[in-house]
Amino acid sequence: MELSDLQVEPTGSVIGAKVSGINLKNEVSQAVLMELRGLLDQYAVLIFPQQYLSPDEFVRAGRIFGSLLPQQLKKYVLKDQPLVGYNSTSDLPRKNGKLHVRGENYHTDHSNFIEPPRATALVAVEIPEIGGDTQFVDTRLAYDNLSSELKEISTHLFSKHVHQSSRSPRELTKLTQEDLAKIPQTIQPLVIRHPNSGRAALYLNTGRMEGIEGMDDDGAYELIDALYSHAIQQEFEYRHVWSKGEMVIWDNRSVMHQANADYDPEKSRYLYRIMIEGPPIEAFAKNTLKD
Ligand code: SIN
């Protein structure tokens, strides 16, 4: 395929674009690779319809965007292709007949890593007819629309990100003491600088943020809650309704995402999942040091 075959159609929401005219099973030229990386920086969520990738094909397609990061939760990894994880209805606990979905509540992936994944991608293998959408909010736009007072306050602050915050609104996968000992924790800025575009974005993950450095807990969680409820407003959102065979990739430095447990627990929802390596998170404020 030629670069000129690519068709890019913005979703009509503030973020996201559908990319067609490409078969991700095939090798892509350097020009197409550079174009796709640039589109991810710009639109933050890219949707590739009708790709029907096998796990190995998904790994190859993912490498267009960078090297693959090994999956953290080894129990949700494909035996034959350990770089590929999966989200499957059949693994999910039920509470009062309702599904408890991994990834509910807006978050960014593995923010407790020193080098969190630059991007995450899913391939839809089985999708329920109704429900199970994935929502994304643009954390760059959320930052741009903060009051100047909140921008000023948050730009020089840092939070410790741990496996599971003591105030987490969502239940994360329970880990053994041994696994927990291997999980990193790190200090991350509240406002980050995008490694390619240089744009500022809020960096929030209420499931993992353990207070704010130098603030008492009451003030810290009040500020986290204020930033979080600002960032998840519908005006910053793109809601993706899945179709079988699609690949969707998103930029973890520009969006938060959340899964939805609103579908029939008897229906299968099964997606392959990969992550792309990223550089360490950088604070937006140039004169602010992480440590
Ligand atoms: C996630 O990675 O948080 C899950 C997204 C989804 O299954 O919709």
Image (cartoon, rainbow, N blue to C red):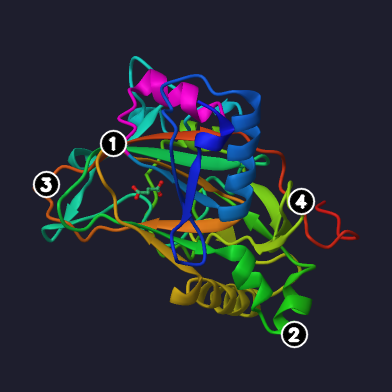
The disc placed on residue 267 is: 3
Q: Which residue is mark 1?
A: 245
Q: Residues within 10 Å of mark 2 (few under 14, many from 20)?
A: few
The disc placed on residue 255 is: none
- Per the model, the C-alpha gap separating discs 3 and 4 is 41 Å
- Residue range in magenta is 50-64
Considering depth in this image, is 40 or 257 the residue closer to the camera?
40
Q: Can see residue 11?
A: yes
Query: Is 191 on the left or on the right of 4, as rendered?
Result: right
Query: Dot 2: what SS?
Result: helix
Magenta span contains residue 58 = yes
Q: Residues within 10 Å of mark 4 (few under 14, many from 20)?
A: some
Query: Dot 1: what SS?
Result: loop
Considering depth in this image, is 44 or 253 the residue closer to the camera?
44
Q: Residues within 10 Å of mark 3 (few under 14, many from 20)?
A: some
Q: Indicate the position of residue 203 as horizontal and vertical percent values.
A: 63, 60
Of pointers 1 and 4, the one earlier in the residue sequence: 1
Q: Which residue is mark 2?
A: 149
The nearer-to-camera label among 1 and 2 is 1
State the residue at coordinates (45%, 20%).
Answer: 26
Instruction: Find out whether the residues at labels 1 and 3 contact each other: C-beta distance under 8 Å.
Output: no
